[in-house]
Each structure stands twice: as C-alpha cells, then as structure tokens.
C-alpha cells in the first residue's frame, strides 16, 4: 500500500481502533494454543479489545495463523491484519545450540546464515516478528537467562547481535525473513545477585561501555523492533524510562522502529512502585515511547480515558499506531494478510537436510573441550573399543533448552544416535544410570503437578536398578562416556539458581564410575556455566555441550570421534565457586590486587577460594598442539588525531599431527585513564586454520577509536597514554607488549 493510502487509513481510524493496534494479546484470547510462559493477566480484556487487537503473541504454525487471521479480518470496520510475533531465539523447528553455545563459536558469519534459516522456517510458519536477538550482557551464571545471551563481552556480543539481526531480516523483501526485535533494553542481564527480575544498578560508564553496545549494534544493523526489560535500571523501570527509550535509543542511536513492552511489564510498573494504577502505568509507558503493550490491560483500558480527559495527546497514539501500521505495510500484509504462509510451504521449509546440516555445523562449533588429559579424546572408533555411554543425557531427546518453545524434542538426534553412526553395535552399550535430577522439592516449588514430577523422577527401586545396570555396563567397557547435565527447567527465564553444581545424584554416580579406574569422558549439558570444580578430577576429558539443539547428538559424536577438531571457546567465565559471583574477565583492578607485590592479608582476595575462575573467558582446547610466537607491533605509537593505525601480529605454529583452527584473541588494557579501565578487554580476534608443521600469522589493525572508553556522560573518548596489548588462545594465557597513544 502506498504511504498516502496508509496515512488515510490511519486518519480513518477511531481512537479506540488506533489504541487496538497498540495492544498485543496471546493465543488464549483468540482460541488458539498458547505457549506463553509468563503470568496470565486477563484483567479488563473485553471481547472488543480482542477484536481490535493489533498483534498476537506466541501463536505459530500456518494452520493456526491462517485461521486466526481469516477470523480477525471478518471483524471490525477495517480489515487490518494481525501481526504474529513469537520467540524464535535460537531456531524455530531446527533448533540451534543455546546462544551461550552460539557465542562459543566465535563465528558471526555462520551465525548470520543460521538466523537466515531460522527466519525462513519462522516465516513459513506464519510468523512476522521474532523476539530476537536477546543481547543482554551477562556476568552472573546464577541468572537462568544467561542461556539466551552470547556472553560477557561487549565486543563479541555486538558482533553476534548484528549478525543475528542481519540474518533474521535478510530476506524480508522476498517475503521469507522476519522482523527482528532486539531485547531487553536495557541491562536486564545485570539483575542483582542473578535473581530473576531483580533490579539492575549500573554506573553510567559501565552502562555505555559494557551493557549498551550490543543493543546499539543491533540498531546499527537495522533492527526494526526493540523490547524493554522487565527490570528497573538505576531505579527507573526500563519500560517507562524516557531517558533510555527516547534520549538514548531514538535520539542518540537513531532507532526509528517500533518499541514493545515485555510481557505485562507495563502493568508491573504498579508493583515496582512507579505507577499508581493501570491508567497511570499506561500514561508513563506511552510517554516514555513504548508503542505496544504486550499482554497487559493497561493500554486497552487506560489510553482512551487519558486522551478524552486531555491528560494525553492523541498525537502520541497516532505516532505509535503509525509505527505499527507501517510495519504491517512493510511486510506486505495489506496485500497478503497471510504473509505467504501456507501449510504446503511450511512443510517444505522446516527441518530440511540443508538446515539440519548447518545446525550440525553450528552445534559442533559451539562445543567447548574443557579438559583432555593424556589426549584421551578423540576416541578412535575403528579401534574396536567398547564404549559405555552412561547418564541421563545418553539417550535423551530433550536437549533443546527452555527457550526453544517451537522445537520438538522428537526431531532431536540423541547422543546415542550420534555415537551409533561411528560404532559397530557391539562397541556401544548405553545405560541411563540415573535421572537428570531427583529433587522433588525443586519441582513442587515450580508448581509442577505430582504426575509431571513422576514423569521425571523414577521410583526409588527403578533408580537403584538403573544405577546397578550402569555400573555393570561400565565394568565391561574400555571407556566410559558420562552424559550429564542440568534439567531443562533449571535454566532459562525464572531459572535462577544459587548452587551451580551438577545434580547430586549424577555426581554420586560419577564418583562410583570413577572407582572403576577406567578413562572417563564427561559431557556436560547445561544452560549456563556450571561450577565443575568438584567433578573436574572425576573425568579425564570434559566436553561442554550446552543444550546443543536438534543436531546435538551428531555434533557431539563428530567431536568425540575426531571428525571435527573442536574450536569452541568460552564467552562466559566458568567460576571456581558460586561465592565468587559475579565473575568476569573484563573487570577493573583494585588498589590492592592479589599479586606477588602484596603477599600479606590485606589484599583483594578470598581467604577460602582463589580469585581465578576454573576456566577463563576465551578458553577452549582443540586436538593436537600449537605454539604462539612473539607478539609484535609495526610501530610503538599511535596518534589519536587523524586516521593513524598500527598492526599487531603474532605467529601460530601447528606443532601437532592434526589440522586445527586457532581463535587468536587480542585484548587491550589502558594503563592510566580518567575512568579506570578493565584489566583486559577484547578488541578483536582472528580464526587461523593451521596444518601440521605450518606457521601462520594472525594480525589485527588497531585504530584509536578501538581504544576509546565511556565517560561519566556516556560519551566515548580517547585519552593519550600507554596501552598494554595482549594476544593468545584465551584471556589468561597471553603474550604481551605495549604501545602509546599520542595526541
Ligand atoms: C520474556 C521475553 C519474551 C516474552 C514473550 C517474556 O517473559 O521476558 O523475552 O520475548 O516473554 O514470550
């Protein structure tokens, strides 16, 4: 529709019809299956509100979308199509590893292609908008939503944010992409103590330097929607924060798209103590710049009285409604309200071999080899070894993680199925050994019914039998592979935990297996960095596999049997102990660091635990070996004025017998600055494939803007002075040099 016609349409709408465009309701109101996860609030939602609503939350699938759209278009004076929005966070039906695993790939190009595919599936299934990417920077794995983030580094998160936005929106013009909605603005990941929905309190320099860059990168990549956070930021609920949503997001960054609240977050302004009642909440949210009210009664009931009593200008409603109509128009919904979705098209686009193949590649690049004593991995499948694959995840399809709401575990390749491709039947014995978790209290605390709990926790006698079987199986094997991990419900939204160990029953079984004195490979399935300190010595090799997605079993087998030499590198620190949290590599120094110059008590350290993590940011092993050369610079000064640059280079020699790929990481430290700077911060990386015996050089061009930092006004500045430069395979094992930045 041309824009004049679209304007005419807006002009012809009544106030109530325009407000309708700003209301988003979930499937239950439309007679559809609802997969929403938040608390249901139906207060004040009348049939008229439903009939006028502009968008639908979390209904997907060609059949349902077409049915709802057709019914909707018959209502009301104007046939304005509904927008269908849902969470396609890391894949639709072809599910990828969780974003924390996606981060570990350090491969934004591949991720972009994966999100093109995810968008293709989602659009074929009738969706128009995906609430992705989630780019909240995370530092505290107690928070269950670290699962949805690519990690603790602003530079890497920004690269991934841009890649995901580009991927999702790439084929929009061709009718195959979806609108991307970046979330959650802002700093939701800083929720205090890792407790879900807790306040975020972040200093201005850190907000701009650490937390905001990834959202900005999404805006720069052309993201068309943004979602607010459920939390307060520095005392103001993000959903009604005009400074954040207007001054920063729109004025400073130039975002021109549509802003949506998070689930019921406008209504929750009351509970936060920021609004008196639903009308007051509506007033504050629309004034701050929130266009769509997701799943709360506030806009539906509050906006009209505000306008008719002249407390709110109708212009505000017009602006927001215009943004909604414009998005519908960009999607071509006025021409084809179904957005191209048909059941036939959906059938041909979901879970195709090409999409599965890319998911397998992404999934294996996400796997991080944490330990590999005596090079026990890869296992040689031709060696006629007998392998005992033990553990609750040995033959389990529920490996998608909590936010893969559209994925079907039945499409998932189990670890056992992956292994079966490599081994003769007599080489592989499998036993569950124990449940994922046997903590009834945890499940009742989550509101699960007794029958649901009984599906997860076996009766005591069965558990005993499972254990005995597992031990018997293991006794007859040459190598034990123990597939362990968290339960899906232990991470994701509202999955905060204080103790991040593997469940007790799994640790007990592992300890018993250890007594058999056989090589043990531990595979860890989890939605977060767990504290692996007490199982670290119980295994010879540890493979961190996250929730690996639909192709998880294939990917894990590819790495275990050496078809793929692991390249995954952590993007979130693995703590030694929960008491260290939050723990992240790019922290500030103290006046009394616990180094060799401070051998006494009064230094910054724990007296009962190290300061260091178990595994640092950037860490991950590969098969074979490499040696890094000296870190060299082509100049030892860089001028702040002009377009000066210098190049850092470091050589990598493959000293082993297998080809491998190094992810060479470059970090910076500003020695003296008016706002003190992190001890290290990533400024670039390069992937370097090296053949046995070969030497290659990784290089990075450094420009002054890469050295800038945020001041107290949130502006980026550079200051002359000395900088340390580090390069290496992770944030800890680095080579170092320095240079100066002059005026
Ligand atoms: C989550 C959002 C999600 C929304 C819609 C909320 O509970 O915080 O990330 O997009 O639900 O499902």
Image (cartoon, grey):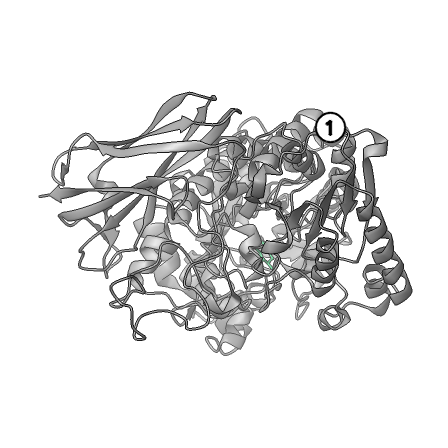
* Residue positioned 67% across, 65% down in the render: 45
Q: What element carries label 1?
A: helix
- Residue 643: x %, y % from top left: 16, 33
The number of numbered badges drawn on the structure is: 1
- Residue 255: x %, y % from top left: 38, 46
- Quarter of the render that holds ligand 1: bottom right
Q: Is residue 476 left or right of residue 497?
A: right
Q: Which residue lies furthest to the front in this view?
A: 517
- Residue 560: x %, y % from top left: 65, 36
Q: Which of 352 and 659 is in front in this view?
A: 659
Name the residue carrying label 1: 383
Q: Nearer the viewer, residue 401 or 667?
A: 667
Q: Which of 316 and 245 is in front in this view?
A: 245
10 Å crowding of disc 1: few (<14), some (14-19), many (20+): few
Q: Which quadrant of the rendered structure holds the C terminus?
A: top left
Is residue 129 in view from this perspective? yes
Is residue 74 in view from this perspective? no
Relative height, residue 95 to residue 284 (above, below): above
Q: Nearer the viewer, residue 104 or 195?
A: 104
């Amino acid at each position: 529709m041309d824009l004049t016609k679209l304007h005419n349409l807006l002009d012809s709408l009544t106030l109530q019809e325009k407000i309708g465009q700003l209301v988003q309701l979930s499937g239950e109101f439309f007679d559809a299956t609802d997969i929403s996860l938040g608390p249901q609030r139906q207060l004040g939602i009348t049939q008229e509100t439903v009939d006028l609503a502009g968008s639908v939350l979390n209904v997907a699938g060609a059949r349902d979308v077409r049915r709802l759209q057709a019914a909707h278009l018959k209502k009301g004076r104007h046939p304005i199509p509904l927008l269908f929005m849902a969470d396609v966070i890391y894949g639709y039906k072809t599910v990828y590893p969780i974003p924390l695993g996606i981060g570990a790939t350090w491969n934004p190009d591949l991720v972009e292609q994966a999100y093109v595919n995810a968008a293709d599936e989602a659009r074929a299934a009738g969706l128009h908008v995906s609430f992705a990417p989630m780019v909240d920077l995370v530092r505290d794995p107690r928070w269950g939503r670290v699962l949805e983030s690519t990690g603790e580094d602003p530079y890497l998160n920004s690269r991934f944010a841009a890649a995901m936005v580009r991927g999702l929106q790439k084929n929009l013009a061709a009718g195959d992409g979806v609108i991307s909605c970046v979330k959650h603005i802002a700093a939701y990941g800083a929720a205090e103590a890792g407790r879900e929905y807790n306040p975020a309190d972040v200093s201005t320099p850190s907000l701009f330097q650490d937390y905001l860059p990834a959202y900005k990168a999404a805006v720069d990549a052309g993201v068309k929607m943004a979602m607010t956070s459920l939390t307060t930021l520095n005392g103001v609920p993000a959903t009604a924060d005009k400074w954040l949503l207007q001054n920063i997001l729109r004025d400073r960054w130039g975002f021109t798209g549509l802003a949506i609240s998070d689930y019921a977050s406008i209504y929750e302004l009351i509970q936060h103590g920021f609004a008196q009642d639903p009308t007051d909440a509506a007033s504050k949210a629309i004034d701050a710049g929130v266009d769509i009210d997701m799943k709360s009664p506030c806009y539906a009931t509050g906006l009209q009285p505000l306008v008719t009593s002249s407390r709110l200008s109708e212009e505000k409603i017009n602006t927001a409604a215009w943004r909604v109509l414009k998005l519908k128009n960009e999607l071509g919904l006025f021409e084809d309200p179904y957005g191209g979705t048909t059941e036939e098209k959906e059938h041909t686009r979901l879970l195709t071999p090409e999409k599965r193949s890319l998911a397998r590649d992404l999934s294996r690049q996400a796997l991080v080899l944490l330990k590999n004593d005596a090079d026990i991995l890869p296992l040689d499948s031709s060696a006629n070894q007998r392998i005992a694959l033990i553990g609750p995840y040995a033959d389990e399809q529920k490996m998608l993680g909590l936010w893969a709401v559209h994925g079907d575990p039945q499409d998932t390749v189990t670890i056992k199925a992956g292994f079966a491709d490599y081994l003769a039947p007599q080489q592989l014995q499998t036993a569950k050994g124990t449940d994922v978790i046997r903590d009834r209290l945890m499940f009742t605390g989550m509101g699960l019914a007794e029958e649901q709990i009984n599906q997860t926790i076996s009766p005591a006698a069965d558990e005993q039998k499972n254990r005995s079987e597992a031990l018997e199986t293991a006794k007859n094997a040459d190598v034990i592979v123990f597939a362990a991990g968290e339960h899906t419900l232990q991470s994701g939204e509202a999955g905060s935990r204080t103790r991040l160990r593997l469940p007790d029953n799994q640790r007990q079984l592992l300890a018993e297996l250890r007594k058999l004195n056989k090589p043990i490979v531990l595979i860890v399935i989890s939605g977060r960095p767990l504290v692996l300190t007490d199982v670290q010595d119980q295994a010879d090799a540890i493979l961190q596999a996250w929730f690996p997605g639909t192709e998880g079993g294939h990917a894990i087998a590819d790495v275990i049997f050496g078809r793929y030499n692991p390249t995954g590198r952590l993007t979130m620190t693995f703590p030694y102990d929960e008491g260290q949290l939050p723990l992240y590599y790019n922290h500030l120094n103290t006046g009394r660091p616990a180094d060799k110059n401070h051998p006494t008590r009064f230094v910054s350290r724990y007296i009962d635990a190290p300061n260091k993590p178990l595994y640092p940011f950037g860490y991950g092993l590969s098969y074979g070996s490499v040696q890094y050369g000296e870190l060299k610079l082509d100049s030892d000064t860089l001028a702040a004025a002009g377009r000066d640059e210098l190049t850092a280079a470091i050589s990598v020699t493959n000293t082993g017998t297998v080809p491998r790929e190094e992810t060479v990481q470059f970090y910076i430290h500003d020695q003296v600055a008016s706002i003190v700077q992190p001890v290290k911060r990533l400024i670039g990386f390069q992937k370097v494939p090296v053949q046995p015996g070969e030497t290659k050089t990784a290089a990075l061009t450094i420009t002054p803007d890469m050295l800038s930092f945020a001041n107290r006004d949130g502006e980026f500045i550079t200051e002359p002075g000395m900088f340390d430069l580090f390069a290496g395979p992770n944030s800890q094992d680095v080579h170092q040099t320095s240079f100066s930045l002059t005026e």
